[in-house]
Every structure is written in structure tokens, then in C-alpha cells.
């Protein structure tokens, strides 16, 4: 069975020959893994049995020289500083209160993202793997960067029409980039993979009523786009977001990714019981403590525990509880996790 077939069966909530494997890792972890194993990134992914590959749009817009000390800039011109993607250095729309101010903002052009090579890159894998595509589309995070998080919450009550338009304009960009990719390469892509973190350690970052009013319209637009091009739609979402899951299912979402088991409401057994027949569940092997602080045996036992809960009946992809394996995660623990999946995730 190919990786692609394996993943498709899992999305259909049927048991494949073995539980599919997912690996998300930081660039720093990948460099470490390749150095230790003496291989390239593809060699590492083959070693662990990763069933997914991904194609990206490439930035081809105006030159954006970073300010001194900054490490990254979003398509919306927000510069960030610090580790990884860091934190925004400013919130240019934090003081707005009118629709005109939103319309006057210099919104990016989706044509800046070049999708011309996506189809050939996807086809190069010859149908072996489940192909991820479309734009990551972190519309929630971009609106927060534009306004500031605390200010955004005030604006939801003080000028709700402005907030709704902000989400619409940010989502317009991601929608069009992904639409362009699917027009160019949709027949070679299986999964529209998007990412927004709506949860904290203790629950959702926004209540269900505000989520439904301000965030669901954007999420629904993206889900509908993926479905228009026959894609499965999978959402990466960190934290405890259980109260929001029924709305996501109603909107047509096919899968949720990462699943942090020690955040409020995200216990694997209850997720499997209540949502396992409606959503593909991806992740849940604890990377907050077991993989980082444990031993290969700790990783093995935690992997066995999660497989026992999540694998029966299909609809599960095995992987760490966060998409970015951090550099400090011991490679031997990660290899133990994947070796255990390969050995014990086999259909009985």
C-alpha cells in the first residue's frame, strides 16, 4: 500500500495496512537529525516512514528588506524579531475604528506568490505520498499582528464591523493564493493544510460565540475552497480548542492536527470517542514532556498508549503533539516513537 493510499483510507475512517506517520520538525531539528544520521532531509523522512510530502507557493513579490534586528516579515508587512518567527515589532492597525481605515491599508497582492512549479513538484513524487498543498493561511494570527491581541478583543465589541472586514481582507489574500495553486496543481494535491492556533493550555483563546461570528466565516471560506477542488481539509490547531470542534465539523472540516493531550479538553480517549468518526485525528503523542524530557523507552510507552486509543477503526495519523519538533528534542526519542509506530501500528 502506498503512503497516499494509506492516508486516504484513514481520512475515510478505515484501517489501512498500518497507521500513517506524520513528521513536522523545526529546521534546527532537521539539521541535527541529518547530521547525526548522515543523510539529507528526504533520507530522514524515509528513515521514519513519513507518509506526507508538501508543495509550497514561492514568494516572488517586491523586495522586502528587513529592518535591523528583525528575522521575518509577513505578507502584510509585519516584521518580527526573536526566536523562530519571533514576535511582531508593531501593530499598525491597533488604533483603527472605521471601515475606511481597513480599506485604505496596503493589502498584499496574491500574485506575489508564485505557484507555477507546484504541479511539477507534486507530480515528481509519482503518487507515492499524500500531498499537502495550499497556503498555510494563518488569518487569525495575522489579524492579531495587525491590531494586537488585547486590542482585537476590545474591537470585537467596540467596532465589530471593522473586525469582520479585517478578517475578510486577510483571508482574501490566502484564499486567492490557494485558489491559484489548486487551479495550477489541484489534481496533484490531496490535502489543503491550513494552520491557526485557537487554543491555549486551558481552553480556547476566544469564546464560541465570538469564534462563530468573527473566525468561522474565514475558516468556512477556506474549507469550501478545498472541497471545491476535491481536497481534504486539515487544520493545524494548538492548545485546548475542544468547544470549537463541533462548529468545525459542521463547516465540513476533514481533519485536525497536533492534538496536545495535556491541554484542557484534549484527552485522546474523549476526542476519539466523541469526534473520531467525524474527523481525522492527527498527532497526540506527547512532545511537551515524553519526547523532550523522557527516554527512548518513555517515548515508546507513550506511543503505544496513544496507538491503543486512537488507531482502532482508522481515522488516525500518528505523530507528535506539536508540528515543530524542537531542536532540544532528543533524536533517539523521536526515532523510538516512529519505530514503535512502524512496529505496532500494523493492522491486526
Image (cartoon, grey):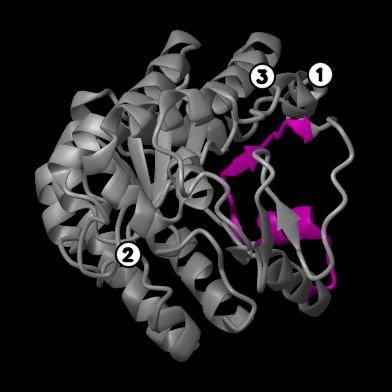
First in sequence: mark 2 or mark 1?
A: 1
What is the crowding at mark 3: few (fewer than 14 residues within 10 Å), some, or many (at least 20)? many
Residue occupied by mark 1: 116
- Give the number of the disc on residue 180: none
Measuring from the top left, give residue 213's x and y in whole percent: 22, 31
- Give the number of the disc on residue 260: 2
Q: Is residue 42 left or right of residue 325?
A: right
Relative depth, front residue between 312 and 212: 212
First in sequence: mark 2 or mark 3?
A: 3
Q: Which residues are magenta?
A: 37-58
Measuring from the top left, give residue 99's x and y in whole percent: 43, 24
Residue 183: image quadrant is top right
Residue 44 magenta-highlighted: yes
Relative depth, front residue between 51 and 330: 330
Residue 299: image quadrant is bottom left
Q: CA distance from mark 2 to mark 1?
A: 36 Å
Numbered-mark total = 3
Q: Is residue 235 above or below residue 186?
A: below
Amino acid at each position: 500500500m502506498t503512503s497516499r493510499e494509506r492516508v486516504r483510507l484513514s481520512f475515510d475512517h478505515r484501517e489501512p495496512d498500518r497507521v500513517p506517520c506524520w513528521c513536522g520538525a523545526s529546521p534546527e531539528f532537521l539539521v541535527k537529525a541529518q547530521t547525526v544520521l548522515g543523510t539529507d532531509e528526504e533520507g530522514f523522512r524515509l528513515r521514519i516512514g513519513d507518509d506526507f510530502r508538501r508543495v509550497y507557493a514561492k514568494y516572488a513579490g517586491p523586495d522586502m528588506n528587513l529592518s535591523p534586528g528583525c528575522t521575518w516579515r509577513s505578507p502584510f508587512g509585519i516584521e518580527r524579531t526573536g526566536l523562530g518567527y519571533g514576535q511582531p515589532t508593531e501593530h499598525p492597525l491597533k488604533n483603527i475604528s472605521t471601515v475606511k481605515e481597513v480599506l485604505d491599508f496596503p493589502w498584499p497582492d496574491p500574485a506575489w506568490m508564485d505557484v507555477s512549479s507546484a504541479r511539477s513538484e507534486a507530480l515528481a513524487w509519482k503518487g507515492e505520498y499524500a500531498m499537502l498543498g495550499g497556503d498555510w493561511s494563518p488569518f487569525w494570527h495575522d489579524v492579531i499582528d495587525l491590531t494586537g491581541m488585547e486590542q482585537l478583543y476590545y474591537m470585537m465589541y467596540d467596532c465589530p464591523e471593522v473586525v469582520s472586514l479585517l478578517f475578510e481582507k486577510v483571508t482574501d489574500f490566502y484564499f486567492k493564493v490557494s485558489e491559484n495553486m489548486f487551479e495550477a496543481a489541484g489534481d496533484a494535491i490531496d490535502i489543503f493544510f491550513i494552520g491557526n492556533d485557537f487554543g491555549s493550555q486551558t481552553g480556547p483563546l476566544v469564546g464560541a460565540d465570538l469564534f462563530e461570528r468573527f473566525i468561522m466565516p474565514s475558516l468556512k471560506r477556506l474549507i469550501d475552497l478545498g472541497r471545491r477542488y476535491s481536497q481534504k481539509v486539515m487544520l493545524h490547531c494548538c492548545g485546548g480548542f475542544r468547544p470549537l470542534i463541533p462548529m468545525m465539523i459542521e463547516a465540513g472540516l476533514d481533519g485536525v492536527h497536533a492534538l496536545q493531550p495535556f491541554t484542557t479538553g484534549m484527552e485522546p480517549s474523549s476526542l476519539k470517542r466523541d469526534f473520531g468518526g467525524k474527523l481525522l485525528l492527527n498527532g497526540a503523542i506527547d512532545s511537551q514532556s515524553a519526547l523532550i524530557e523522557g527516554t527512548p523507552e518513555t517515548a515508546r510507552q507513550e506511543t503505544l498508549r496513544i496507538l491503543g486509543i486512537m488507531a482502532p477503526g482508522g481515522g488516525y495519523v500518528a505523530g507528535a503533539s506539536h508540528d515543530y519538533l524542537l531542536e532540544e528534542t532528543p533524536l533517539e526519542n523521536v526515532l523510538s516513537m516512529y519505530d514503535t509506530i512502524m512496529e505496532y501500528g500494523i493492522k491486526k
